Image (cartoon, rainbow, N blue to C red):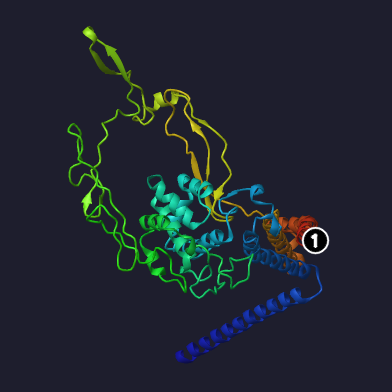
Amino acid sequence: RGCSVMAGRKGADAARGGAGAAAYGAAVLAGLRSFVGAVFSLSVHSYFLWSSLLFAGCGIALMVTKPGVQSFLCHKPAHDTFGGPGCLNCRAELLMCPKDLCYRSAVNITWETRAADPTGSLYQSFMEAATDLPCNDLVNKHASDPVAMIVAIDGDSAAVTSGCKSFHCAVLKNALGDNTDLDSDTGVCTDVYGAKTEVEPSTCVCASLLPSITSAQKTAIDDVCGSFLQEKCPWGSFWPAWCGATTVAPSTATPNTTAGGASMRLLLVAAAPPQNTTTAPPCSGVDGLGGGAVDRLLTPPRHPAWAEVAAVTGGAGNTTSKPATDRRLQNAPAPPVELNQQLEDWTVGEWSKCTCYQQCIPGVMTRLVQCLAAQCKTPEPASKQRCVCPHCAECSVVRRMSLLSFLFFGQAGLAFIVFLCYLHATTVKEESLIKISILRKLMGASCKNLPPLVRLSILASVPFTFLIVVQTYVPKIVSL
């Protein structure tokens, strides 16, 4: 009998559980039907749902296409012959803008293939070169092509950084055929990177660079970049004059020639130094050439630039040297905080234009920093900082695209909130409105006030859209 009672109870519990599950399933199914009906029926809440999806899609489309637009503008040449504002009218100072196509293409390809991202083998060298002011000055004033840049570096090697040397050596190697977009021993070049915008894709824009290298330029290139030029002997049907040349110290005072006809260079050995001079001891840093070292006279020691020496005349015509009054140097230890606050401020100028090799890549901007007092506050303000050069196209459409995409996302959010409010209102029963909670009051306020905001945001997006259309198509129509 007890077993029968327990079995009956279990059966009743199972029946109630089954009924509860069925009721829950029916409720879920009814909710899905209500949601599908709300989405696909012609109603107020379905209007706001589809509006939110449409606005979100427009915002996503703008965000996805914006990098492509930026890339297109960055690849638009700044020269006025290509519709640009001209090199002097850019918002940044572009070092490569006035150079020839070979030099510009070599720098572009070198940066794109080896320095555009932190994983590139020349990324650190490029970042160092881009902020190296003496290096930028050589590019701006002395480098008409990659060879001239290396010669300029060789003449002022101590002033530039190792990154400047490494990057520009890579530029020269690419220009001399390491990259077949620029030169090839077959005379026919490729166009993998699309850098040659002014000529036919198969044209070797740097073909004239290797034949123009003189023996003196080769020596400078060997000093800065190593002896890679020997690998270019021969270069197709061309045999440079410096190919196969050797440098051997002659044993006599007359020049000799090798069997191949290469000229030997005569090394002049200095005469013995005067009796009262000091010669450099071995391993003192004096260069050795050929078979014998060239003795160089050592200059007498000089006083540091900051140590002024005043001549004081003593008795009987004796003259002694006495240091001038000590000066407090700017690189002295930092003063205490209380004293530092009492010192004068540094005088700083305005930041210059961003200086880069090309548009849309990192560069450097500078400003004048001066201390007009004996000592100024520490730390000293920075006189240079990194920057990124903007493109030279007279078009600010990317910024407007960003603003318009944010506006679309805002519209999508407002419309979706209104949809949820209206959808919830369709499920509210009359008896639940006897006492309205604060949450429902907020939802009611949203249903009443947010729809006008959605309409206003639509009206606000119309001028942005119209302006982008005008910027895109009107110049093309005018140029027809």
How far across and down, in percent of the image, does residue 360 sit? 58, 56
Q: Quadrant of the C terminus?
A: bottom right
Seen at 25% across and 41% down, the residue is: 296
Foreground pick, 292 / 11: 292
Seen at 69% across and 68% down, the residue is: 57
Drawn side of residue 438 relative to residue 259, left or right: right
On screen, residue 327 above or below 18? above
**Residue 457 seen in render:** no
**Residue type for callout 1:** Ser
Foreground pick, 388 / 187: 187
- Quarter of the figure with residue 476: bottom right
Foreground pick, 253 / 120: 253
Residue identified by numbered label 1: 479
Number of numbered discs: 1
How far across and down, in percent of the image, does residue 428 sit? 74, 67
Foreground pick, 376 / 474: 474
